[in-house]
Each structure stands twice: as structure tokens, then as C-alpha cells.
Amino acid sequence: NRGADVDFGFTEEQLMIQDVARRIAQEKIAPSAEHHDRTGEFPLDNIRTLGENGLMGIEVPAEYGGSGMDPISYVLAMVEIAAADAAHSTIVSVNNSLFCNGILTHGTEEQKQTYVRAIAEGKEIGAFALTEPQSGSDATAMRCKAVRQADGSYKINGKKSWITSGPVAKYFVLFAMTDPDKGARGITAFIVDGDREGFGRGKTEPKLGIRASATCEIEFNDYVARPEDVLGEEGHGFKIAMGVLDAGRIGIASQAIGIARAAYEATLEYVKERKAFGQPIGAFQMTQAKIADMKCKLDASLLLTLRAAWTKGQGSRFTTEAAVAKLTASEAAMWITHQALQIHGGMGYSKEMPIERYFRDAKITEIYEGTSEIQRLVIARHETGLR
Ligand code: CAA
Ligand code: FAD
């Protein structure tokens, strides 16, 4: 089994970027996490700091403004950022794996220099627009249309919903239908500039969790995309989206691990301090069973996510590994934060502690970048060859 063959030794570079991420996460992000959750204020300052330290383009080569690191470094850094605040890690994840990755893999030299550099350096924010009001899981059912004009440009009309960083992003990787008769093979990817005519942003969505990650609908009214705004080839957009999401799912798995680790570590402290019936609550067998199960799920999630990252780093297809990691880690995060809240009793339910925030933040990891049902579908189709 190729997937089980993992080298567990981290390199000095990998540990170094983990250290940088941990330092910024603990010194800058964690102290303001409660504020950002309460107010929903977009953490632009912190995002700039992450960019200046190479964390907005971790896998982007230095010639395009990034850190030139590998997928394992990306996992290690994302876990640290998410453990401090999940909303920050959502913004980081979209910039790194959905925006930069797609353009690096499919873009022209000019597209890489123009768009990847600005995002990797944290000077601008990037976004990824696939979902529409009537099509989320069933992504090929999109209605946003790009119609080719006589001069080779495209006129784009339609809506995209739930766009992470939509209210603040400068550039978007957009998927639109150029040939509706061809279904998945009629979808084309474009790079869109949010400052150009014909582009509109809706109101920021109020959300259960990751509240400082700004999300909104975006709208296109006769937006004109130039021929040089096409990413990859016409009709190849859906494969580009799916390939990019494979990488994105490693990022979301890492985010889930970070949230779960924060909840687990807080719980380990609490069970030693809090007493009931004359002993620390951590001495009760029922609490110990919960701690053991939390530890198993956390470790399993991390190992599966490192396996997915390692497979990606080998240059092999990693669709299944990424789906296994994302499914396991997101469901583990939901379970672990639920148990953490229960173990904290009333304090778990209170806004005086971050546990209820971890619980609210964990839920999104089971929904975006493909719901748990979609991950199961991807895995089972691969395993059975049936659909
Ligand atoms: N890599 C490359 N190509 C792929 C692929 C992959 N991982 N997955 C599918 N394809 C190709 C197929 O080979 C097929 O190609 P051909 O036409 O040449 O045969 C084509 O794409 C269509 O594939 P399917 O027939 O499998 O397509 P489907 O309609 O059955 O859908 C799906 C498959 C897995 C359900 C897909 O629609 C999906 O992943 N849905 C979930 C959407 C999603 O994850 N959205 C996330 C939005 S971004 C986001 O959420 C960001 C954020 O939170 C921060
Ligand atoms: P639906 O597809 O309508 O699904 C509803 C339910 O039906 C789910 O439980 C689903 O699992 C289930 N279901 C659907 N199909 C099947 C099936 N075949 N078998 C079994 N069950 C099924 N999208 C972007 O493009 N860019 C972004 O930046 C982005 N950011 C997001 C940020 C947030 C906070 C949120 C909430 C969403 C974001 N999304 C983004 C959209 C996200 O990817 C979708 O919400 C997600 O893919 C699910 O789509 P949906 O909401 O339309 O649910």
C-alpha cells in the first residue's frame, strides 16, 4: 500500500516554518481571537503579517513571492494558525491552496507574476468562486455564464455564493459555464479583478463560526474578461476546480486538527484542575475514556493529513488521500470539541472560555470544500469503481 509508506522525520525547513507560524499565531493571532470572533472584524493586519512572513504562499516558489516549501510544511503551519484562530486559517487556506495553487499549476508566466506574487506576499487577498445559490455539492449545475465575444473576450453574467474573503478580495479564481451543452467539460476558469466594472459584492453573511472570515455573494453583470484572463484552457475549468480542491482539502483537514488540538489541550489542563466529589474530574474513568478517544482521533487525523500531504509532495494523484484526511479530521474536530465542551461543564458553554468558539468553528470543516457526504462519495467511488 503506497499510502502507508510515510517518512515521519520532519526536515529543518519544515520545523522552521512551523516555528514561524506558531510564533505569529501565539503572539499576534491568539490574543485577538476573541475580539475577532465577537466583532466579526476582518483581521487585515494579521493577514499582512502572515504574508510578510511567507505564510500566505507557503508552497509558492520564491520567484513568485512565496516560501517555496512543501505540502507537509503547509500542514504544520496551518495547524498552528488554526489552533490560535480558525477564522484566520480559513483566509490563509483559501489564499494558499485555492488561489495560488490553481494559478501556479495552470497559469501563464504573466498570470503567476501578476496574481500569485501579490497574494503570496499578503499585499492583496485572493478568493475562489465555484458555489452558486442553487449549486454547492453539485458543482457542475452552475448557471454563471461566460459568453465569448467576436473580439475573443468573454461577457460574464451570474452569481456566486458563500465566497470566502469575497468582501475584501482583489482577485478571484472564477468558474463559469462557457458551453452549457458539455456539462463538466463546458466549464472554464477565469481570473477576475474585483475592482473592474461589472463586478459586485453582496452583504457579508453573519455566521455560526469562523466569524472574522468574511463571506459574501458576488455578482457579475456584463463583466468583461479578456482572453488573457482565462486560466488554463477553455472547457478545462472543472478539472482545475477539482484538482485545486484536492489540495484545499489538505488545508481544511489541517484547520480541523488545529481547532481540535486547541480544544484537547485546554481539556487536558482543565481535567487536572477542576475537582468534583473530592478528586480531579480527569481521574474519573468516564473522563479518561473521553481523553483517550480524543487523543486517538487527533493523532489519526494528523497522520492521515500528513500522508495526504506527503502523497501530494511525491507528485502522485492524492484525491482519495485528501478526502480521507478531510473527512476524518473534520469529524474528529466536531467530536473532540463537543467532548471538550461537555468536560468543561457550564464553563464550556460560557463565552469566558474559548471552548464554545472551538465548537462553533469546528462545524464548518464538515461543510465547506465538500461536505462529509461528498468526501464519502469521492472515497467510495474510488474504492469500488462504482457510481
Ligand atoms: N481531479 C481531476 N479531475 C477530476 C477530479 C479530481 N479530483 N474529480 C473529478 N474530476 C473530473 C472527472 O474525471 C471528470 O472528467 P471527464 O469529464 O474527463 O470524465 C469530471 O471531472 C467530472 O467528474 P464527475 O463525473 O466525478 O463529477 P460529478 O458531477 O459527479 O461531481 C463531485 C463530483 C466530487 C461531487 C464534485 O462535484 C465535488 O467535489 N463537489 C463538491 C464541491 C466543493 O467541494 N465545493 C467547494 C467550494 S470551495 C469552498 O468551499 C472554499 C472554502 O470553503 C473556504
Ligand atoms: P448542498 O449541496 O445543497 O447540500 C445540502 C446537503 O445535501 C448536505 O448535507 C450535502 O452533503 C447533501 N448532499 C448533496 N449531494 C449529496 C449526495 N450526492 N449524496 C449525499 N448527500 C448529498 N464556496 C466557494 O465556491 N468558495 C468559497 O470560498 C466558499 N466558502 C465558504 C465559506 C462558508 C462559511 C460556507 C458555509 C460555504 C462556503 N462555500 C464556498 C460553499 C461550500 O463549499 C458549500 O456550502 C458546500 O460545498 C455545500 O454546498 P451547499 O451549501 O449548496 O449544500
Image: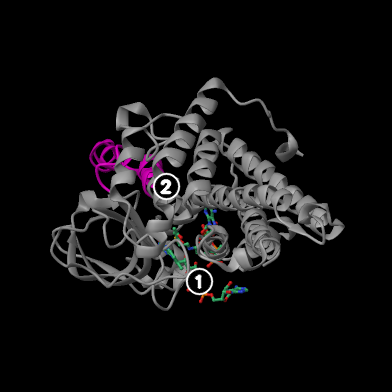
Q: Quadrant of the C terminus?
A: bottom right
- Which element carries disc 2, helix, strand or loop? helix
Residue 31: image tag: 2
Q: Which residue is mark 1?
A: 138
Quarter of the image where one finds residue 381: bottom right
Q: Is residue 170 above or below residue 68?
A: below
Q: Quadrant of the N terminus?
A: top right
Q: Position of residue 329 (x, y in %)?
A: 64, 53
- Foreground residue among 14 and 272: 272
Q: Are marks 1 and 2 in contact (CB under 8 Å)?
A: no
Q: Furthest-front residue in view?
A: 278
Whether the residue under disc 1 has CB within 8 Å of ligand 2 = yes
Q: Position of residue 150 (x, y in %)?
A: 15, 63
Residue 39 in sight in this render: yes
- Foreground residue among 239 and 306: 306
Distance from disc 1 to disc 2, alpha carbons, whole Å, reads 39 Å
Q: Is residue 124 above or below residue 331?
A: above
- Which residues fall within the magenta stretch? 99-124
Q: Determine the residue positioned at 46% across, 69% down.
A: 140
Q: Furthest-top residue in view?
A: 12
